[in-house]
Image (cartoon, rainbow, N blue to C red):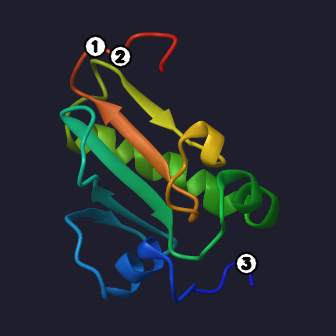
Amino acid sequence: MAGEPQADCLFCKIVSGEVPATVVRESETTVAFRDINPKAPTHVLVIPRAHYPDAASLAAAEPAVAADILREAAAVAAGDQVDATGYRIVFNTGAGAGQTVFHAHAHVLGGRGLEWPPG
């Protein structure tokens, strides 16, 4: 059921503390942690505590939490001091777009030049 923790979800396990992560921020609705395979000097994932398979399903069910993710992404950028130089927020939705963990999440990337269009 959407919103409920999934036993086989890596990010649900990070939220519960079952799997360790380098957490940089937490709020009532979100957790932000460093990506284990960073693509930029700042590469942090911001996830909702509740399980939704992708950004679209999260936004449809809980738009306020989707907004919380964007707010926390900005706070992560400020904390890593990439807010002044620029950063990217990326939501991959679906395997064809590169989503590998099917728990909604935003990538916050910064600290290097970010070409457009991306891959």
Amino acid type for the residue under numbered disc 3: Ala
Cα–Cα gap, marks 2 and 1: 4 Å
Kind of residue indicated by mark 1: Gly
User: Quarter of the image holding residue 107?
Assistant: top left
Mark nearer the N terminus (2 vs 3): 3
Q: What residue sits 52% from the left and 12% below the top? A: 117
In the rendered image, which residue does mark 1 sit on?
Answer: 113
Q: Quadrant of the N terminus?
A: bottom right
Label number found at residue 99: none
Image point 62% across, 52% down: which residue?
67
Q: Residues within 10 Å of mark 3 (few under 14, many from 20)?
A: few
How many numbered marks have been drawn onto this rendered protein structure? 3
Residue at which label 2 appears: 114
Residue 2 percent location from the top left of the image = 73, 78
Q: CA separation, marks 3 and 1?
A: 36 Å
Q: How crowded is the residue under tag 1: few (<14 C-alpha within 10 Å), some, or many (20+)?
A: few
The answer to whether residue 58 is left or right of residue 90 is right
- Front residue of this view, candidates 100 and 104: 100
Q: Are marks 3 and 1 in contact (CB under 8 Å)?
A: no
Read off the residue under disc 3: 2
Left or right side of 86 for 90: right
Find numbered disc 3 in the image and state the secondary structure of the residue it sits on.
Answer: loop
Residue 66 placement (x, y as % from top left): 63, 55
Image: 53 above or below 93: below
Q: Secondary structure at mark 1?
A: loop
Left or right, 12 with reference to 20: right
In the image shown, does 36 or 27 lie closer to the viewer?
Answer: 36
Q: Is residue 48 above or below residue 50?
A: above
